[in-house]
Amino acid sequence: MRKPNYKPLHAGQVLREFAKCFKDKELRSRYPYAMIDRDTIIATDSHIILKYQHHMPIIDGTVYVKLDHAAQFSAKDDLILDGEHLQGMASGLIIPAHREPVKLFETIKRIVQS
């Protein structure tokens, strides 16, 4: 079997791409969160659900970040969770992240898992 000739995306790159998908800045400031759950990144603007499964666990557990903030990560950023902040390894950017569930994602988790 042939070895795939692509490199897995960095978590920062995925978040940047997700943020670009939600063009309406007014909605983006209100809704879009990204949920990072071990090796999966899910983003939504309450209508569209985007899902990306990463090549390895990004963080242990689940955190939620606003895509408006996450869009500032470098495309080369791998992410680490430092308490209540998510930090990009390459850029050093630090953004707020929280562990309390965002209500919207409870529904999305059920949809994605089914």
Image (tube, grey):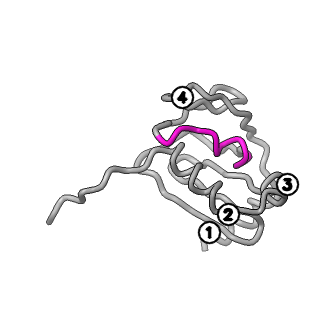
Q: Check disc 2 and report its element: helix, strand or loop.
A: helix
Whether tag 2 and tag 4 are in contact, CB under 8 A, the answer is: no
Q: Quadrant of the C terminus?
A: bottom right
Instruction: Report the side of 110 relative to 13 (left or right).
Output: right
Q: Which residue is mark 1?
A: 112
Q: Check disc 3 and report its element: helix, strand or loop.
A: helix
Residue drawn at x 58%, y 49% is 16
Figure check: 25 above or below 107: above
Answer few, some or many: residues within 10 Å of disc 2's Cα (few below 14, many 20 plus, some between 14 and 19). Answer: few
Q: Which residue is mark 4?
A: 91
Q: Earlier in the sequence, mark 3 or mark 2?
A: 3
Whether tag 1 and tag 2 are in contact, CB under 8 A, the answer is: yes
Quarter occupied by residue 64 = top right
Q: Which residue is mark 2?
A: 109
Residue drawn at x 67%, y 72% is 111
Residue type, mark 3 in image:
Arg
Distance, label 2 to label 4, CA atoms, is 30 Å
Figure check: 1 above or below 90: below
Instruction: Report the side of 48 relative to 51 (left or right).
Output: right
Which-is-in-front pick, marks 4 and 1? 4
Percent position (x, y) of residue 101? 78, 49
Residue span colored magenta:
66-75
Distance, label 1 to label 2, CA atoms, is 5 Å
Q: Which residue is mark 3?
A: 30
Residue type, mark 1 in image:
Val
Whether tag 4 and tag 3 are in contact, CB under 8 A, the answer is: no
Answer few, some or many: residues within 10 Å of disc 4's Cα (few below 14, many 20 plus, some between 14 and 19). Answer: some
Percent position (x, y) of residue 40? 54, 53
